[in-house]
Image: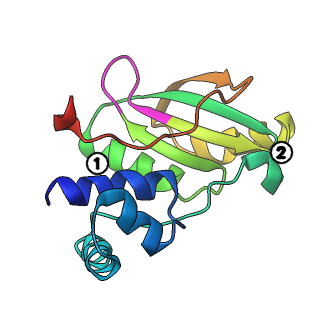
Amino acid sequence: MDAIDLKILEQLQIDAKVSMVSLAEKVGLSEPACYRRVRQLRTSGHIEKEVAVIKPKTMGWPLSMMLMVQLERDHGSIVNQFIDRVNQAPEVLDSWYVTGDFDVVLQVVATDMEAFDEFTQRVLHKDGSVKSVKTLVVMRHSKMAGPIPPAFDR
C-alpha cells in the first residue's frame, strides 16, 4: 500500500459512490489505473465493506444509548461468550472490548424505554456474567464516524 492507495481510501470514506473518473482525478491517476487499485483494495480486505449510513430514528429506533458493562470476571471465555451473545441482538449497533473500569461498551438502540428494559432483561441479565451496567442516554449524536486519516501523515 502506498500514498496513492491511502488517498483513494480517504476519498472513498468521504463518498463511496464517487465516480471512478472523479476519484481518479482527485488522486492523480488514470481511470483504469484507479479502478485496478480500488479493486485490489477490496480484494485484499483493506476495504471491508461499503454501506449506506442511516440514522437509527429513520429505521424506527428513536432512542440511542451507550452502555458500559462490567462483567463478574474478566476471563477470556466469559468476555467472548458475552460479546458473542450481545452481538446477536439487533439492538446492538456496535460493541467494544475495552480496558479500565468496564469490560465492554455497547451502542444500543430502542424503540422506547419499555423496549430498552426488555432488551436489558433478555440480553444483559440473562446469565450471571454481568456485574454492573452504566447507561448513558444519547441526547444528540454530534459527530458521525468520519474518515480515518493515515496515521503517518501527521
Q: CA distance from mark 2 to mark 1?
A: 32 Å
What is the x, y in percent for residue 98?
A: 34, 31
Image point 28% across, 48% down: which residue?
77
Residue 48: tell me if it is visible.
no
Image point 35% across, 77% down: which residue?
31
Classed neighbour count for the residue bearing mark 2: other residues with Cα under 10 Å, few (<14), some (14–19), many (≥20): some
The residue wearing badge 1 is 77
Amino acid type, mark 2: Thr
Amino acid type, mark 1: Ser
Residue closer to the observer: 66 or 147: 147
* Marking on residue 111: 2
Residue 64: within the magenta?
no
What is the x, y in percent for residue 154?
A: 21, 28
**Residue 38 as seen in the image, left or right of residue 121:** left
Magenta residues, dominant SS class? loop
Image point 25% across, 42% down: which residue?
150
**Residue 129 as seen in the image, left or right of residue 38:** right
